[in-house]
Image: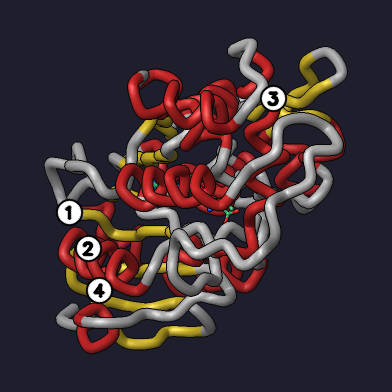
Amino acid sequence: MSLAGAKAVGRPTAPEAAGANGAELGSTEFAAIAAIMQSDARIHLAPGKVTLVQSRLNRRVRKHGLDSFKDYVKLVQSNAEERRAMVVALTTNHTHFFREGHHFDHLRETAMPWLKKQAEHKPVRIWSAGCSSGEEVYSIAMCLRGPDRGTASWLDRADVKLLATDLSPIVVDTARSGVYPANAVQPIPAPYRASWLRPEGADFAVVDEVRKMVTARVLNLFEAWPMRQKYDVIFCRNVMIYFDDAAKAELEARFVDLLVPGGYLYIGHSERLIGAAATQMKPAGHTIYVKEGR
Ligand SMILES: C[S@@+](CC[C@H](N)C(=O)[O-])C[C@H]1O[C@@H](n2cnc3c(N)ncnc32)[C@H](O)[C@@H]1O
């Protein structure tokens, strides 16, 4: 996506978006929609996103039998269910398996030896925050299991759980199912594909040993978190680009707080730590950070 990368909300610079394929989104309605995105998901809609917002929401306008964004905004302002659906429709869920491969190299080579040691005396917890349809969390799980079935025996003796969360119930359903079309599983290195996927009709399913390591649930990152214990690894990649600096700083500080000393935080390729998190985390690779105090 890029709904991000923004200046101030509510000052669309684009002319009224043309409505070749549906209702036109005017600047007042864009501002109202941007304000909802900011308050509900902390997603910052830049003024230049008028056309994108219009095209993503036109289907919902039609679904409700409306023919103007004015009426749609009225609906959203009075109907909590549609308001949630609108926020979901305006998220971008682009992802793929083994995205940003250097993170998985680091996980295998540096984090995993430490995680194995951790697992000898405590539960190990890993979070994919903003997981989209689950490709990220299953890439992590496959790395932990290793390229072939014989290398994962340490996991059988350990308490290792992965949590995958996202704002959008639609993508969380896919993450929970662990079933992907053939083209989606292509980026998985061949040995991992052979070990940890099985055909399911025309698709591929993550095998039970891997799928059962993962709990997928809906969570807005700016609401209360369900964790009752500290985490060893957090992936939050290509999510914070959609937030303004205040929201990023707040979220990153909460991630740091949740990590055990020595725990790792992986962020997206164009992201950086700001605020308190920047002083509490030590760089451990490109867009990889380790919490001080191990
Ligand atoms: C571009 S995807 C990134 C997926 C994956 N982390 C990756 O890097 O491939 C961004 C995800 O963040 C989610 N997201 C955006 N705002 C969120 C929020 N406030 N709370 C939880 N998830 C959010 C979106 O629904 C979307 O699925």
Q: Is residue 240 above or below residue 119?
A: below
Give the crowd class for mark 2: few <14, some 14-19, many >=20 residues within 10 Å: many
Name the residue at 25% across, 77% down. Answer: 291
Q: Give the residue at mark 4.
A: 262
Name the residue at 39% across, 36% down. Answer: 156
Q: Earlier in the sequence, mark 1 or mark 4?
A: 1
Q: In the rendered structure, are the residues bearing label 3 and label 4 in contact, judged by CB atoms less than 8 Å apart?
A: no
Disc on res. 230 = 1
Q: Earlier in the sequence, mark 2 or mark 1?
A: 1
Q: In front: mark 2 or mark 4?
A: 2
Find the distance from the CA under tag 2 to the CA under tag 1. Answer: 6 Å
Q: Position of residue 120 (x, y in %)?
A: 24, 53
**Is there any visible trace of residue 113 in the rendered image?**
no
Q: Identify the amino acid type marked 3.
A: Arg
Q: Give the residue at mark 2.
A: 259
Q: Quadrant of the C terminus?
A: bottom left
Q: Secondary structure at mark 2?
A: strand
**Is there any visible trace of residue 7 in the rendered image?**
yes
Q: In front: mark 3 or mark 1?
A: 3
- Depth order, front residue of 233/287: 287
Q: Which picture quadrant has residue 246?
A: bottom left
Q: Give the residue at mark 3.
A: 59
Q: Earlier in the sequence, mark 3 or mark 4?
A: 3
